[in-house]
Image: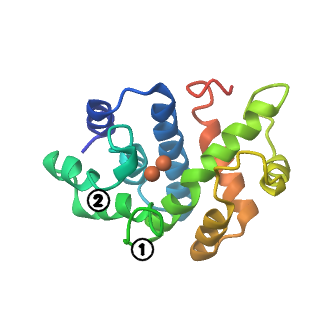
Amino acid sequence: MTREDALALYRSYNSSESLYRHALSVEAVMRRFATEYGEDPDWWGIVGILHDIDYELYPQEHLKHAPDMLRKAGVDERMIRAVLSHGWTICSDVEPMHRMEQVLFTIDELTGLVTATALMRPSRSLSDLEVSSVKKKWKTKGFSAGVNRELIAEGASRMGMDLDRVIRLTIEGMRTIAADLDLA
Ligand SMILES: [Fe+2]
Ligand SMILES: [Fe+2]
């Protein structure tokens, strides 16, 4: 499956622009972490594009329909497992075990916190966003309250990576597509 195939498959089930930006954000961050770990950025990126494929149509049954959608399109079972694992403890019982799965689990919601933090800045840009700004917002309970900090911290510890470094790599990944996110 190519990136174009994955985008077409995603778009065949989704039309929301904000969800599309989320998919692109997670893709970009997955690619950044793959490079960091010496893994295949194309493979990791595709998992990022597809991870929320059933969310727009089935928000109350998230990940219940994704396996069918992905299998019908011939997506690799390892990718399907990875997609399912990002909802572990919330809407799936597939535990993130592989490194790729642990990264996806960790950065999914973190991309939302990074976006929200960037939007608070006068520049509304990722280019000058620092880890410390995200950490400050992390500690502000009422800010982006929907972002589950505990889950992100749990993911980082599973990855065996310091939270600051996870945030830094997430910012770096999102910077590569800042223009597409309107955060340039
Ligand atoms: Fe999700
Ligand atoms: Fe997501």
Q: Which residue is mark 2?
A: 80
Q: Quadrant of residue 173?
A: top right
Q: Residues within 10 Å of mark 2 (few under 14, many from 20)?
A: many
Which residue: 45% across, 67% down? 88
Towards the viewer: 66 or 114: 66
Q: Which residue is mark 1?
A: 95
Q: CA distance from mark 1 to mark 2?
A: 13 Å
Side (left or right) of 103 relative to 174: left
Image coordinates of residue 111 in percent, x first then y, are 61, 46
Towards the viewer: 112 or 162: 112
Asked if residue 88 is positioned above or below residue 169 in the image, the reply reads below
Tag on residue 76? none
Towards the viewer: 19 or 30: 19
Residue 51 visible (yes or no): no
SS of the residue under disc 2? helix
Quadrant showing the N terminus: top left
Which residue: 28% across, 64% down? 78
The residue under label 2 is which amino acid type?
Ile
Side (left or right) of 75 relative to 57: left
Pointer 1 or 2: first along the chain: 2
State whether label 2 is within 8 Å of ligand 1.
Answer: no
